[in-house]
Image (tube, helix red, strand yellow):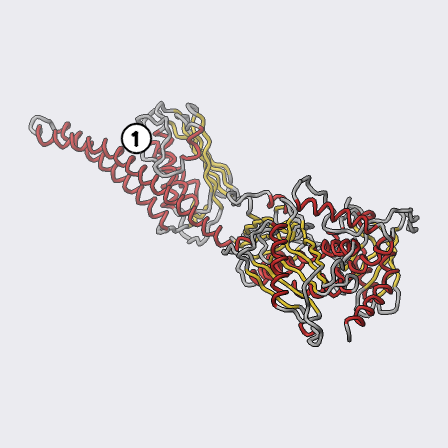
């Protein structure tokens, strides 16, 4: 097929589509072209006016994403019934940007390429179609919709000129239909193309039907540093610019002509982009070389050339990512209409190239994160999950419940906004937990990433730190235990050195007197000093015994042999013994309530418990007074309390009195090791009981013990 025949066929196709394209662009109804996967190929401006979303926001999603979740099942069912040559009509609701929804009546039909065409009419609140208002024709959306910053640079002037050209072009009916066909073809190829080469190949073929050229092509800056300014740019270690150069012609191309075109285009690209391309790496591809007619005369000198920049907006300023060009041997080949059409095509080409590169970047990211041990998500500007590796999918099943819109709003106990505001130096802020699984702890880090100048993406990295938190807890417990051990050793050394000093001094003094003045001392005096030595040694032995009891209890080697005993008789005997041993200033009183006073307990440990309590009550009541011992028995428990009228315990010391070697600050010169209450508490706990203390300074202290009526593993024996 000759070139002229190809041109004729394409012109016929363009004329056949003109009527639909004019209606598509100017209609007040919702018009769209949809791929089989619900992604948009093309939309008209009525979507923005009716639903509030910009076209770039809608194009980033899909037809199904714009539908209210409640009507999505009906929409899918209707969409699946669409067949070529048939029209399907149904109603659904579409989400408005203000948070509401709008009812729409749709008519759908399909072409042979399985592209679905839709025309939607908005419904009033009563369900009737809205009256179509007279509207001025709206220009097709381009990447230049956002207002440009005021600047005097050449690039900004080019952008403003491009907007003026597009507005002028849209005001002309005939030219609008031609540009609409080009826009339709470009948008369609942008969704179908898999790389820059395939995209440019299709675009240049479409331009061939409207612009008479002998040679065409494009050049792209393949490094994304000047456009993306984001995560992927940091991965490049070389600073040499890289360019892809594509040429399309149907005639043999002499090397001298090719070289001349390359130099001219690179100079223009360097001037517009601000990138030094003198040392650029240039990859040149001839598009569709099979289409070159070897029998045709070689291409001669290019007398007419058009160069149009491919421009994309970024956060800082517009950026040139390449050029489109056409050339012809004949001088003055191109007119003003051709310039307008080429500018119009270039604006959409730039957007599609960036979108294509974003898709490729997402595909590349998918390969990178596929086997990572952390969960990695990619979210779009609506917080929808665009990409997730296997780990992330498993974590999402635990941490989030996403609706049909696939929007991620919360991870565990924290919202997405809370996590976005967290900083890297605040790990606690990034921790995520679950009420259902308190032992599972995750760390979620969310950071923005630039992959498309039109869209905001967010990378979410989720890491399971449950094992790390458990290990940290173990380390913290070990540190606390080590700290307690150091404190315990200090108290032991301090207590032993203090408590041993006095009896050792007594022993040494008495021994020296007996040795040096034995002849001068009578029998009574010698017996007195011997008694002092025996008393001091007994005190030291009791201190050692108490320390051994503490060690045996903490190491789990304490002999625990519970038997059944009569608790009333047991307590009465101990009270009587201590009354005999105490001075006459103290009065020990015992009272018992309850009929059944049988208790299962270890008598040796029980004796130690009650002895320690009575000894403390007598010791810390230096002025004497009554010491009340009360026993209250019931079928389930036995409660024993010892109350004195002594010096009491300061409030700030009451929480520590059960710690080994701890003594309150008001004990003054009263001897003691600080082990009595600690031993009593440990022995009570061996019986499954509880011990509590209540005290007021200079008013007295009451220690209350509550035993269960039975203890595990009792041994029957005669009552003691």
In the rendered image, is residue 291 in sight? Answer: no
Residue at 18% across, 33% down = 507
Quadrant location of the N terminus in the rendered image: bottom right
Towards the viewer: 228 or 541:
228
Q: Which residue is mark 1?
A: 671
Q: Quadrant of residue 685?
A: top left
Residue 467 is situated, as x and y percent measured from the top left of the image, at 49, 54
Towards the viewer: 367 or 375:
367
Quadrant location of the C terminus in the rendered image: top left
Outermost residue, left side: 519
In the image, taking residue 552 as reference, residue 343 lies left or right, namely: right
Residue 512 is situated, as x and y percent measured from the top left of the image, at 12, 31
Q: Is residue 400 above or below residue 541?
A: below
Residue at 85% across, 63% down = 17
Q: Is residue 307 above or below residue 148?
A: below
State how many labels appear.
1
Q: Is residue 180 above or below residue 621?
A: below
Residue at 56% across, 58% down = 242
Residue 134 is situated, as x and y percent measured from the top left of the image, at 91, 46
Towards the viewer: 385 or 640:
385
Mark 1 element type: loop
Residue 190 is situated, as x and y percent measured from the top left of the image, at 71, 61
Q: Quadrant of residue 567?
A: top left
The local crowd at label 1, few if under 14, some if 14 to 19, many if 20 or more residues have their Cα within 10 Å, is few
In the rendered image, is residue 427 in sight? Answer: yes
Towards the viewer: 198 or 577:
198
In the image, taking residue 705 as reference, residue 166 lies left or right, namely: right
């Amino acid at each position: 097929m000759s070139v002229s025949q190809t041109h004729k066929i394409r012109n016929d196709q363009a004329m056949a589509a003109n009527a639909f394209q004019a209606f598509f662009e100017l209609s007040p109804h919702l018009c769209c072209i949809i791929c089989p996967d619900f992604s948009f190929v093309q939309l008209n401006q009525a979507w923005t006016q009716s639903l509030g979303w910009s076209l770039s926001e809608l194009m980033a999603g899909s037809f199904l994403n714009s539908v209210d979740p409640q009507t999505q099942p009906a929409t899918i069912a209707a969409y699946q019934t669409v067949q070529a040559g048939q029209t399907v009509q149904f109603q659904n609701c579409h989400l408005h940007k203000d948070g509401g929804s709008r009812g729409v009546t749709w008519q759908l039909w399909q072409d042979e390429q399985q592209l679905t065409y839709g025309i939607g009419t908005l419904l009033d609140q009563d369900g009737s179609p809205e009256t179509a208002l007279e509207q001025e024709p709206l220009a097709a959306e381009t990447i230049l919709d956002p207002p440009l910053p005021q600047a005097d640079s050449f690039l900004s002037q080019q952008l403003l000129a491009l907007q003026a050209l597009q507005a002028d072009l849209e005001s002309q009916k005939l030219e609008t239909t031609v540009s609409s066909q080009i826009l339709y073809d470009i948008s369609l190829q942008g969704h179908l193309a898999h790389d820059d080469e395939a995209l440019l190949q299709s675009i240049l073929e479409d331009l061939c039907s409207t612009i008479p050229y002998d040679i065409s092509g494009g050049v792209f800056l393949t490094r994304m540093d000047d456009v993306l300014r984001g995560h992927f740019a940091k991965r490049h270690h070389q600073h040499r610019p890289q360019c892809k150069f594509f040429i399309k012609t149907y005639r043999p191309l002499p090397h001298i002509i090719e070289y001349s075109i390359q130099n001219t285009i690179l100079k223009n690209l360097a001037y517009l982009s601000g990138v030094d391309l003198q040392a650029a790496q240039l990859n040149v591809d001839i598009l569709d070389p099979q289409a070159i007619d070897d029998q045709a005369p070689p291409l001669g000198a290019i007398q007419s050339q058009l160069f149009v920049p491919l421009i994309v907006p970024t956060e800082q300023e517009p950026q040139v990512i390449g050029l489109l060009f056409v050339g012809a041997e004949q001088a003055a080949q191109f007119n003003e209409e051709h310039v307008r059409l080429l500018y119009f095509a270039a604006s959409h080409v730039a957007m599609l190239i960036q979108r294509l590169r974003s898709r490729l970047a997402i595909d590349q990211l998918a390969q990178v994160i596929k086997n990572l041990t952390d969960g990695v998500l990619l979210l779009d500007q609506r917080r929808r999950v665009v990409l997730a590796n296997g780990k992330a999918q498993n974590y999402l099943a635990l941490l989030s419940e996403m609706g049909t819109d696939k929007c991620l709003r919360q991870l565990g106990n924290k919202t997405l906004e809370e996590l976005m505001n967290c900083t890297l130096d605040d790990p606690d802020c990034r921790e995520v937990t679950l009420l259902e699984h308190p032992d599972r702890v995750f760390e979620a880090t969310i950071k923005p990433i630039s992959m498309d100048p039109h869209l905001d993406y967010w990378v979410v990295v989720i890491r399971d730190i449950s094992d790390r938190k458990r290990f940290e807890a173990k380390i913290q417990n070990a540190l606390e235990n080590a700290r307690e051990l150091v404190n315990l050793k200090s108290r032991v050394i301090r207590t032993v050195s203090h408590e041993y000093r006095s009896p050792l001094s007594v022993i040494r003094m008495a021994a020296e007197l007996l040795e040096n003045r034995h002849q001068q001392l009578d029998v009574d005096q010698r017996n007195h000093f011997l008694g002092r030595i025996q008393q001091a040694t007994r005190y030291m032995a009791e201190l050692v015994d108490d320390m051994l009891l503490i060690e045996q209890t903490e190491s789990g080697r304490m002999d625990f042999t519970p038997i059944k005993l009569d608790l009333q008789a047991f307590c009465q005997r101990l009270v009587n013994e201590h009354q005999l041993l105490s001075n006459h200033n103290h009065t020990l009183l015992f009272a018992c309530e309850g009929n059944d006073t049988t208790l299962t307990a270890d008598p040796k440990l029980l004796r130690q418990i009650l002895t320690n309590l009575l000894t403390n009550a007598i010791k810390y009541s230096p002025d004497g007074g009554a010491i009340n011992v009360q026993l209250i028995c019931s079928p389930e428990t036995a409660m024993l309390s010892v109350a004195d009228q002594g010096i009491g315990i300061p409030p700030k010391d009451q929480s520590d009195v059960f710690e080994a070697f701890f003594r309150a600050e008001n004990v003054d010169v009263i001897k003691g090791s600080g082990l009595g209450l600690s031993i009593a508490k440990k022995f009570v706990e061996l019986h499954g009981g509880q011990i509590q203390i209540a005290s007021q300074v200079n008013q007295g202290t009451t220690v209350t013990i509550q035993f269960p009526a039975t203890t595990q593993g009792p041994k029957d024996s005669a009552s003691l």
